[in-house]
């Protein structure tokens, strides 16, 4: 129980700081600022990774539930998908290929250094 409260408090703190950064700096989404802050808290050991691990594992195991409403929303747009489906699938495959290629090339160049 204590680890769950510990995890939730650090995650909420990170998200709140993310919203504060967003209010001051703008640019990135607040949740992304929060994830960066949470990563820094873990990296500099201001937050104990072994105490938040169980909560993070639980969140990952149940992540599929978060995508059900999005899937239902997409199915409500069936006529639009039917009209532009091939273009959407093409864009998804091309951009995924480009991102994976870019990350792979960048990794190889950084690895060689």
Image (cartoon, rainbow, N blue to C red):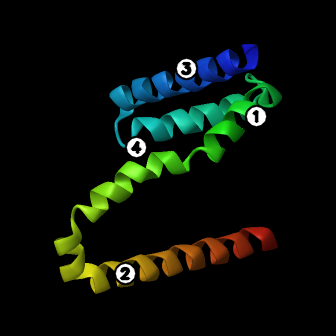
- As helix, strand or loop, the secondary structure at mark 1 comes to helix
Across and down, in percent, residue 7 comes to: 67, 23
CB-based contact (under 8 Å), mark 3 and mark 2: no
Taking depth in this image into account, of 96 and 1 the one nearest to the observer is 1
Measured Cα–Cα span from mark 3 to mark 1? 17 Å
- As helix, strand or loop, the secondary structure at mark 4 comes to loop
N-terminal of the two: label 2 or label 1? 1
Q: Residues within 10 Å of mark 3 (few under 14, many from 20)?
A: some
CB-based contact (under 8 Å), mark 4 and mark 3: no
Q: Nearer the viewer, mark 3 or mark 2?
A: 2
Across and down, in percent, residue 36 comes to: 57, 38
The residue shown at (48%, 41%) is 32
Q: Which residue is mark 2?
A: 89
Across and down, in percent, residue 56 comes to: 68, 37
Taking depth in this image into account, of 44 and 72 the one nearest to the observer is 72
Q: Nearer the viewer, mark 4 or mark 2?
A: 2
N-terminal of the two: label 3 or label 2? 3
Q: Which residue is mark 4?
A: 28
N-terminal of the two: label 4 or label 2? 4
Q: Which residue is mark 3?
A: 13
N-terminal of the two: label 4 or label 3? 3
């Amino acid at each position: 129980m204590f680890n769950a409260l510990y995890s939730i408090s650090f995650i909420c703190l990170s998200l709140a700081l993310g919203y504060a950064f967003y209010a001051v700096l703008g640019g990135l989404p607040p949740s992304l600022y929060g994830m960066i802050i949470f990563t820094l808290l873990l990296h500099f050991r201001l937050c104990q990774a072994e105490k938040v691990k169980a909560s993070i594992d639980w969140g990952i195991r149940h992540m599929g539930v978060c995508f059900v409403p999005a899937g239902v929303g997409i199915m409500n747009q069936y006529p639009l998908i039917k009209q532009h489906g091939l273009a959407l699938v093409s864009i998804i495959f091309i951009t995924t290929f480009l991102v994976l290629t870019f990350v792979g090339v960048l990794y190889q160049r950084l690895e060689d250094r």
